[in-house]
Image (cartoon, rainbow, N blue to C red):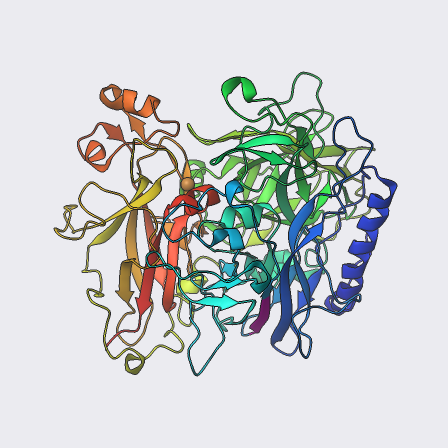
Amino acid sequence: MRRKQTEREMLMRRWIGAAGLVAALCVGAGKGTAVAANLVDPPVFSSQNGVLDIMMVAMPQPIPGISFTPPNSSEIIHPTAWVYQICPRPASGLSCPAGSLTVSPYGGVRLALQQGNTLKIRYVNQLPKLDPNKLRHETDPGEANLYLNPSNLHTHGLITPARAATLSDPTFGDFVYVSIFNSANGIPVPQSTHQHGPIVMDTVDYKIVIPANHPSGLFWFHPHVHGIALNQVVQGLSGMITIGSVGDNLHGDAVNSPWPETNVRHLMLKEIQVLAGGTVNFDSGPQPVAAGEVLNQEDTSFCTQFPATGEVRQGSCPGQDNSGSGGSNFTGGNWYMTVNGQQFPSIPVAEADGEIWRLATGAGSFSWDLQLVDDLTQNPMTVQLIAIDGVAVHLPQDTSTGAMVDMAGGRFKVVACPDAPVIGATVPVCVNEIVMMPSSRTELWVTYRNAEGRITPPPAGASATLKMVGLTMGTGDAWPAVDLAKVRFNQSGARQYTSNQIVVGGSTDAAGVYQQGGIFSAQVPGASAAAQPAQPAGCTPLPPGHRRRIFFGFSDVTINNTFALGYEEIDQNGNVVPGTQKPAPDQLERFDPSHTTVCLPLGPGQTPVRETWELVQLSTENHNFHLHQTRFRKTGSNGGVVQDNFLLGVAVPDASISDQVLNNQNGVCIISQWRSGHCASTPTVLDIPFAELGEFVYHCHILEHEDGGMMARIQVVPSLH
Ligand SMILES: [Cu+2]
């Protein structure tokens, strides 16, 4: 049974834990075999006296937790990931000193912040130069420098300004348009079109102030340079951020006990394709690859989607030969799926009251469909859903099961919560299957439950397998099934927390952020009319009753990989406002960083603005919608499910245009076909508050699609009044 720790003890132990992780992984790697080690939480960097001041060096490093043996070889290869090496910021220089305060785990770290803190990061790019023939977007407009491997940082889900550096303040806020180049790779050539924004050599200082009224929750960070975000995230660059603590959004019995704060796990799911050698097909044609090389421009058909009869996949699936259908031969390679950088770890659940699991994904394009399958019955176990995308799932008691699923965009399968009466006018949400598209976060109460979902002491030897059960994205990618971890329920002793549901909700929950003083209600800090002497042309408030409509599809339906977005404004009667269509009527466009699609001022007195957006799917492949610097909810779900990525359904073209769809791998309609009823697709309608200034983006978070152009620029400016 795990010893309970006070918060103070946990703070003191965090650095020790960081050093311990590195040591544990090295022991396993030294034996040259996969070790079923217990899952270790990511190393934690906590703010001190209101500030977290660190250096993050993006750099290559072998993955100790993955031991790959190529075919016909006894050699053990630890594939090279790109990791963030992190340390407290040194007094000078651009490298972290050797020692226990410096960590660089492939599995990622957690930056633990509190409301009102300042996150200061000296970000250093030491990533290697790339082979242009192994990149997808080298010939796209403005992407000629991508082989130099520029990077930057986005703090996903944080509600903070998207601030560029100025002469008076050389630090950046959460600003994705800056590109940081490693000078060792050569000097980038400025582009005449599609220039991303500032080019900076080697290092940038970020200063991200967490508002005092920022919601508590689980967030994450990753690079966001358009055209190469997929490659960098897939090769390992991501980590977690937490604001506040789990208990901030729990109440009832839960806060009167040291549990659950002391029984929290953080699980970062990552996946990486490792090649056996030979040749692999890239957009440029077949290219030689080395044994152990990482394929960061992922091929979704690397493995068969489901294992053959009797095949066991523990943390990886074997590469298959696709050469018969014109693809690559991945035989001998492995696609690894890890938790905190560990391949198929054990997770002992020993606390009588169970544990809170906070899951994040460091995925580029990969979507997980997760179940915790009881090894004895082979049935998915019931867990209580605590939060999604860092927001407590606090639903009114009259919320129907169907409404829950609808509000959440089909992100989980709801089942009964036995013996869990309504407490405090909220209903618990129990689930036994969870879909996590790229950028999703999910928080769960995991404790042993029997086949009926009832909490009960586990029988001796009870265990379950955390499984990715396989997921197909409409007519798009088919992601493979792989077992991720073994969970052992060794729970004993008396329960201290005796309720059968955790009551979620708190001052910063879905409803709290809109109340007086909440981040979507209070005046926006730092905004003033004086700071904005003139509005950008056309930057006016959306008239009352009007909506913005975003189309998800292709800029050219005859060509694959031209992912794009369309835009129009519609009036209170649902009619298109003439002249608002971008780039033009019936057209979609690929991301152009020099082109602002949406601009809006804050409300009178520099207050947050709420808008209604409609998302229209034109593809028969799923996408998910993400908008920086805020979060959103489906209209009609007041106080309900709030999130920062939303799974879009798929378009259903009718027979008159099905040939066109069949001829296209991903399937897509054009806007006029949707208008004329030949492409059935119900808009997703979102209520979106804007409470931060700056220039940022909205996009599909499947990074293959984002890099391909399914992204657009948005700007929020101060009000003139
Ligand atoms: Cu997409």
Please identify the quarter of the rendering in which residue 4 is found.
bottom right
Q: Quadrant of residue 520?
A: bottom left
What residue sits 68% from the left and 44% below the top?
A: 339
Q: Which of 419 and 395 is in front in this view?
A: 395
| Residue 500 in sight here | no
Decide if residue 248 is in sight here: yes
Task: Please tell me which residue lies in front, 415 or 307.
Answer: 307
**Residue range highlighted in magenta:** 117-123
Of residues 172 and 626, which is closer to you in this image?
172
Magenta region, main secondary structure: strand
* Nearer the observer, 574 or 707: 707
Q: Name the quadrant where ligand 1 sits.
A: top left
- In the rendered image, the quadrant that contains the C terminus is bottom left
Give x and y (percent) for residue 425.
48, 52
Quarter of the view holding residue 510: bottom left
Q: Is residue 156 shown left or right of residue 350?
A: left
Q: Residue 38, image x and y in percent?
A: 79, 45
Q: How many marks?
A: 0
Magenta segment includes 120? yes
Residue 13 screen position, x and y as percent: 79, 65
Indicate the position of residue 395 as horizontal and vertical percent values.
46, 49
- Give left or right: position of 422 versus 75: left
Which residue corresponds to the image point at 28% horizontal and 79% vertical from the top-left?
529
Please check the rendered image and state whether residue 473 is part of the magenta-colored stretch, yes or no.
Answer: no
